[in-house]
Amino acid sequence: MEIVKDKLIPVTSVRAGKGEELSADVFMYTNQVVNLFFVEIPGPEKKWVMVDTGMPKSAETLRDLVELRYGEGSKPEAIILTHGHFDHVGAVEELVELWNVPVYAHPLELPYLTGKQNYPEPDSTVEGGMVAKLSSMMFPNEAINLGNKVTVLPEDHSVPFLPEWKWIHTPGHAPGHISLFRETDGMLLVGDAFVTVKQESLYKVLVQEQEISGPPRYLTTDWRQAWESVKKLQALNPSVAATGHGAPMAGELLKTSLDKLVQEFETIAIPDHGRYVDGN
């Protein structure tokens, strides 16, 4: 299986390299500017699942993190991908080669994960800040090729190895984008269906200024679907939301912020102009 030679993406944040325990069994790690998650499997043995794999060129860092946290030679039972954008699958090819574990994704993401189709190019014409303007130059949109290592998530919305969790189809940012939800404690792993930092702004990404926002504008291609996905997640009434970018949000702040995002999505999230805005 060929390893894609990804670009080294020169963006970072004050949260880079830091981890946070979201609960007794969910750990979040920030890889440059994107969050990935380690979710433990119920039972006496300390087994776990990885959700997303961070930025390109990060496989060695993530391997070292895993061995520090779980012990030498440790590996997940599986990798779950919220979607196939470069900052969520950056290390997956190398980690699959290293660990030989299955990868699960929504069927609509498989063309981008098996080398059959590239994502649309990032839209650098959207307003919002320097990250958006540089996106077409900095951010790769090429498909990766996991071959037969990737398989579709179960149709019943269960999550492999995680009996308390369900996956939810939340398209808009990507056709097969998913979020993960655990009803018992209201834990929501959002992916990029919405985020808690204005991802288009270089300054806000760097300092991680917290504010609820729609999905990253420069890579979102269907804004009507994106709005419907946010409504779907709001209806779950989550107690904690850990997004693909930005700090976790919880409690009343999460409720009021998510309510506002749904009500004012057109002004908060949807760009005034852009390649993927017209016709949505």
Image (tube, rainbow, N blue to C red):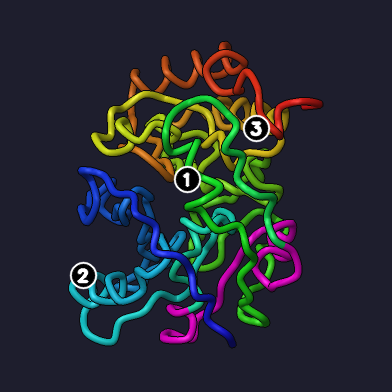
Instruction: Indicate which disc residue 69 carries.
Output: 2
Q: Amino acid at mark 3?
A: Ala
CA–CA distance between discs 2 and 3? 35 Å
Q: Amino acid at mark 2?
A: Arg
Position of 269 relative to 216 (above/below): above
Which one is in front, 72 or 139? 139
Residue at 60% from the left image edge and 67% from the top image edge: 104
> Is 85 on the left-hand or right-hand side of 46?
right
Which one is in front, 141 or 236? 141
Q: Amino acid at mark 1?
A: Arg
SS under mark 2 = helix
Residue 28 visible, this angle: no
Q: Quadrant of residue 68?
A: bottom left
| Residue range of the region highlighted in magenta in the rendering | 94-117
According to the picture, the residue beneath numbered tag 1 turns out to be 182
Residue at 51% from the left image edge and 53% from the top image edge: 139
Residue at 64% from the left image edge and 66% from the top image edge: 143
Disc 2 to disc 1: CB gap under 8 Å: no
**Residue 97 included in the magenta stretch of the image:** yes
According to the picture, the residue beneath numbered tag 3 turns out to be 226
| Residue projecting furthest to the right | 279
Residue 130 pos. (x, y %): 42, 34
Q: Which comes before the other along the chain, label 2 or label 3?
A: 2
Residue 188 pos. (x, y %): 45, 41
